[in-house]
Image (cartoon, rainbow, N blue to C red):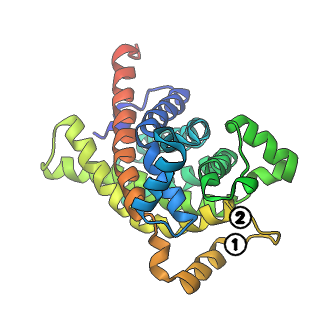
Amino acid sequence: MSASIQDAKVPKFVNFVIGGMSGVIAQIATHPLDVLKIRMQVSRDTFRDAALRTLGTSGICGFYAGLSAALLRQLTYTTSRLGIYTTLLDIGEQHFGYLNYVSMISLGMMAGVMGSFVGTPTDLVLIRMVADVNLPPEKRRNYRNAVSGIFNIWKADGFFGLWRGAMPTMSRAAIVNGAQLGTYTRAKMLLRDTGYVQNDIPLQIAAAMMSSIITCFASIPVDVAKTRIQNWRQPMKPPGVTAMIVNIAKTEGIMSLWRGFLPYYSRAAPNTVITMVCVDQLHRMYSKFFPVL
């Protein structure tokens, strides 16, 4: 029996609480790599250049730029996507038993799209807070924190300005969550059924590592385009995600679409491991300490 079916009696709201807690823990551990990934994507810096620029301009604290926005993003986006996915997976397995791989990917994509729509304003603030260091001092936005950033964007661009880049964000989320959540669930089943890994935490870690490889390769071109759109500074309206991808490939070379892959994967792999292990373990702890009578 899968972990989802075992946890099927966990109240639905607990799925959302567990998702948010797991995302926050993972973000704190991997935020410096998120900072380097964003700064590489809005410039031509290498991993080394981005790290040295960050260290030189802001010191060690620079690697935690935008942390307030990143944590708020986890409390909106990750809470929603993991809560929705776990809830949908529970319902599906209760009614249909084992779901096939396509169904798992579809549920992951649905959860990602809905969660990313909720989290787009905080994602926008995160991109701008982290990318500020690449701008001349007179052009920097200098948001004090996530909340002030949201109000500044609202004041300058209107309420709907908070959803700039929503389409590429949702497109990326569909790819990321379909690959990450669907592959993670399927990998756990395969590893357990084939007998290669049986122990609880090693099984979760192995499945998370497998899903992170597929997720990173498939999603980083859209992530690069999303970052460029959300950090757009020119007077004209930014292009759509497809046009941005084509433009980057034409002007900078197709491999530029995978710029920042090292910090992206270096963050995604431990982030996926920490998030998914926390989700499974927190579900287990809840079931242990709050059994359904």
Task: Pick whichever, 22 or 147, lies toward us.
Answer: 147
- The quarter in which the C terminus is drawn is top left
Quarter assignment of residue 139: bottom right
Q: Residue furthest left?
A: 195
Residue kind at label 2, given as amino acid type: Trp
For marks 2 and 1, give the one nearer the viewer: 2
Mark 2 and mark 1 in contact? Answer it, CB < 8 Å: no
Residue at image coords 28%, 50%: 207
Vertically, is 20 above or below 259? above
Q: Is residue 142 above or below residue 175?
A: above
Which residue is outermost to the bottom? 250
Q: Secondary structure at mark 2?
A: loop
Say which of 256 and 209 sits in front: 256
Q: Residues within 10 Å of mark 1 (few under 14, many from 20)?
A: some
Q: Which of the 4 quarters of the picture holds residue 265? A: bottom left
Q: Quadrant of the N terminus?
A: top left
Query: Which residue shows up at 39% across the image and 45% down it?
Result: 271
Distance in Å between CA atoms under marks 2 and 1: 12 Å
Image point (40%, 57%), residue name: 263
Q: Is residue 177 visible?
A: no
Numbered mark located on residue 232 in the image: 2
Residue 272 drawn above or below residue 285: below
Q: Nearer the viewer, residue 256 or 276?
A: 256
Of the image marks 2 and 1, the number of the one nearer the N terminus: 2
The percent position of residue 158, horizontal first and vertical second, equals: 87, 50
Residue 257, image x and y in percent?
49, 73
Looking at the picture, how far across and down is residue 144, in whole percent?
Answer: 70, 37
Residue 81, image x and y in percent? 54, 44
Q: Say which of 279 and 190 sits in front.
A: 279
Q: Which residue is mark 1?
A: 240
Instruction: Give neighbour class at mark 2: few <14, some 14-19, many 20+ (Cα, 10 Å).
Output: some
Mark linked to residue 183: none
